[in-house]
Image (cartoon, helix red, strand yellow):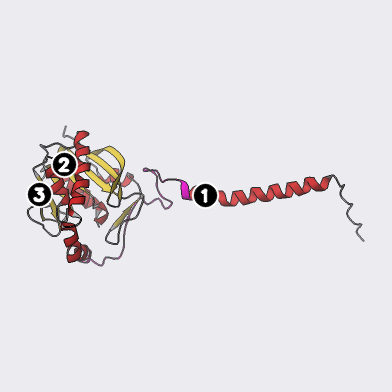
Amino acid sequence: MLSPLPKLPLILKPFLLSLFFSVSALIFIASITPHHRQTTTKTPLFTTNSTGLDLRIRPGYSSYNAYIQHQLNKTLNPKLRNIWKTRDWERKVRVFSYFFESLKQRNLLSNASKALSIGARVGQEVEALRRVGVSESIGIDLVPSPPLVVKGDFHAQPFENETFDFEFSNVFDHALYPWKFVGEIERTLKPGGVCVLHVALFRRADKYSANDLYSVRPLVELFKESELVEVKRVDGFGLDTEVVFRKKKKM
């Protein structure tokens, strides 16, 4: 028969009690710390996400025509088009004018630039370019909106090679084929020309988006004929990052 454990000295009881509560407190803190870090740390611009895929194409399109029709459902929505042309018009023109003035101050855009806005809807960006002095400006969209926007698919721009000095777009997330989207920009951009993209890195875009971007790295890889000039945070109608490229000059 086992003999009973000896009784602890009275002086050790407070010490052991204190040790027990200290260890319990440490276990509790350790359990909540990872969650705290996860909710407060911001995602760096150049890191990859947990899967290693920084550019994801959204599934669900049975054909290219199905993709186009999905985009047209938004572009042709009469309520949205009325809002874009009335209530939203002046507000968006004012914000785009601010962006373009900033680009002019950084010598990335000038009054002499021949400019293109890609995915321009009813033309707020084009109107803003003209208001800040870039008079030779035009937009393209699946649905034309004369005189500011002509009909065009950004996967196959309706322009000759090396037409523009400056191209702007805030619809990269709508590209089903991002490599074609960027390829057409570089084809129609003059050597030394500038492309500015507004993209979402820190939030997901709407249901009409065809891809999700998680860092700038895929853009750098797609712009094969250009150099990265700037990356900065912006607040542009749900888009949070401005990325600037300059097409390399021919040797």
Let me know if residue 55 is in the magenta part. Answer: yes
Does the magenta run of residues contain 144? no
Residue situated furthest left in the rendering = 147
Task: Return the residue nearer the eye: 155 or 72.
Answer: 72
161, above or below 78, in the image: above
Residue at mark 3 to residue at mark 2: CA–CA distance: 14 Å
Task: Find numbered disc 2 in the image and state the secondary structure of the residue it sits on.
Answer: strand
In percent of width and height, residue 232 lies at 31, 40
Q: Position of residue 51 (x, y in %)?
A: 42, 53
Dominant SS in magenta: loop
Question: Mark on residue 36?
Answer: 1
**Residue 197 sits above or below residue 246 on the image:** below
The magenta segment: 39-67
Whichever of labels 1 and 3 marks the residue nearer the N terminus, that label is: 1
Q: Quadrant of the N terminus?
A: bottom right
At label 3, the amino acid type is: Phe
Q: Which residue is mark 2?
A: 166
Mark nearest the camera among 3 and 2 is: 2
Name the kind of residue labelled 1 in the image: His
State the residue at coordinates (22%, 46%).
Answer: 95
Q: Which badge, 1 or 2, comes first in the chain's sequence?
A: 1
Q: CA distance from mark 1 to mark 3?
A: 51 Å
Along the line of sight, the residue nearer the viewer: 99 or 139: 99
- At 20% from the left and 50% from the top, the residue drawn is 92
The kind of residue on which mark 2 rests is: Phe
| Frontmost residue, 231 versus 97 | 97
Residue designated by label 3 = 159
User: Do tag 3 and tag 2 residues touch (Cβ < 8 Å)?
Assistant: no
Q: Residue at x 60, y 49 (%)?
A: 30
Q: Residue furthest top?
A: 251
